[in-house]
Amino acid sequence: MKEEITRFAPSPTGHLHIGGARTALFSWLFARSKKGKFLLRFEDTDKERSKKEFEESIISSLSWLGIEPDEKPIYQSKNIKSHQKEALNLLESGKAYSCDCSPEQLSEMREKQIKNKLQPKYDGLNREKNISHKEGNVIRFKMPQSGKTIFEDQILGPITVENRELDDFIILRGDGSPTYNFSAALDDKEMKITTVIRGDDHITNTLKQINILKALEEELPQYAHLPMVLSNSGKRLSKRDGAVDITDYRKGGYLKEAIINYLVKLGWSYSDQEIFSKEELVSLFNLSAVNSSPAKFSEELINFYNNYYLNLLDIKNLYELIDTEYEVSFNIKSNDKYLDILNLVREGAKTVLDLIDQIKFFYEVPSYEEQHKELITSNIEVVKIFSENIENIDFNNQQNLENDLKSFLSSKNLKFPQLGKPLRLILSGRQNAPSISQLLFFLGEEESLKRINFFLD
């Protein structure tokens, strides 16, 4: 049985984004589920836009996610000479032809077609002229003029197009450089790719590449086109909707396990299971379970996964992650209860950055909004009475501290909100914060009294 080989083929013209990462993950999972190979190919023939920094960023993001290729990356630009040679072979065999149409001719051709409500495409003007090929001419591939191009998509089902709808596309430009569709088809052949998994915006490209491979009498790979990821409103995903780079998610405090879980749920499911280990994904993944409808991006869901994995991390590992990967304006270890503080706050944190922001008030005196000052001032007498009795509170044991608080309120005939609301604001600068007993216990007697006296003074 032939070994399954998939590939992820990004252009290094930008960082790895959510859609590209999903394509890479599905290609990697499919190869792993078949005990095959996953390869990485950089389609770097756009000399102006291709950058080394983007190439390194894509490799780094894939590595961070654990999507590692089984061989060293392949660079399309290194195959230009062989692609040029193949184009000339097709020209010589009569499966392609030289074309000297000027930009003005092509523009006029397009305008006429649009005016006549026809699909704009090259009309085959030079197809049968047998023009001698010379520098400056392009080479066009002779697409079949009758019949249909048909393939069975592993996700979308049968795809059929009448060949008369396809035009004789350029395979070699006037400057001698091969075009994307020609190079991609040849590279898939050379790499022995058995299944091409990519976005459904490539269906037109697939139709062209299939005909190239047929002309070369090569075996066709399987094709699987992933429906697009849309925004909640059903529109094309933009940065505002969440189409940010994987590097941004990483810097923003998302864990790789959460990203992997979220990516795989963008179009694939297994029963009603929500959480998957990498091992489970490899054993369960199959293309037939990928939804043929577009997936919708959900910030709420990605935050759910991230919160889940934040709370699953060993608390010491969470501290190490913060210490090694994030800049923090305060020394977390300066509070000897720092692990307990992290454990307390992570329960409601969406990201690592959110967690850092939420523990900040344990280390730095918070700033107070005007409305908070008014609320504190209106209850200042209750706070003053509490401060005068603070020596009766046991700060060494949280349970004792809670009991002492209850005793204080009972002895002064006070209801909890009378002390709780202003004291929470004084200690944390926030209305939504941990309980009063937790705040007092983790801040300690000295720091708690210091913040209370700030208002009493």
Image (cartoon, helix red, strand yellow):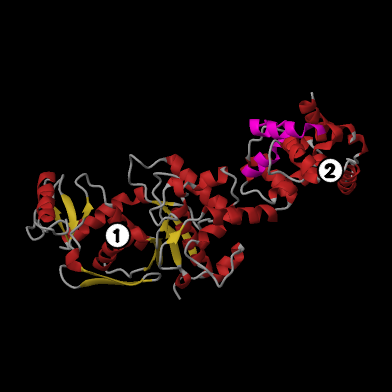
Q: Residue furthest top?
A: 457
Kindly report the distance in space between the C-alpha atoms of the residues bearing marks 1 and 2: 74 Å
Q: Is residue 312 depicted above or below 55 in this figure?
A: below
Residue segment shown in magenta: 354-381
Identify the element where label 1 is drawn: helix
The location of residue 18, given as percent across then percent down, is 47, 52
Question: Callout 1, which amino acid?
Answer: Asn
Question: Callout 2, which amino acid?
Answer: Leu
Residue labelled with disc 2: 414
Relative depth, front residue between 310 and 225: 310
The location of residue 332, given as percent across then percent down, is 74, 37
Left or right, 179 with reference to 348: left
Left or right, 333 with reference to 149: right
| Neighbours of disc 1 within 10 Å: few (<14), some (14-19), many (20+) | some
Q: Is residue 368 depicted above or below 64 in this figure?
A: above
**Is residue 101 at least partly visible in the picture?**
no
The location of residue 185, given as percent across then percent down, is 32, 60
The location of residue 3, given as percent across then percent down, is 46, 70
Which label sits in the foreground, 1 or 2? 2
In the picture, which quadrant includes the N terminus?
Answer: bottom left
Task: Let me know if residue 364 is in the magenta part.
Answer: yes
**Is residue 125 at least partly visible in the picture?**
yes
| Neighbours of disc 2 within 10 Å: few (<14), some (14-19), many (20+) | few
Left or right, 351 with reference to 387: left
Q: Residue at x 41, y 46 (%)?
A: 12
Q: Residue at x 44, y 68 (%)?
A: 291
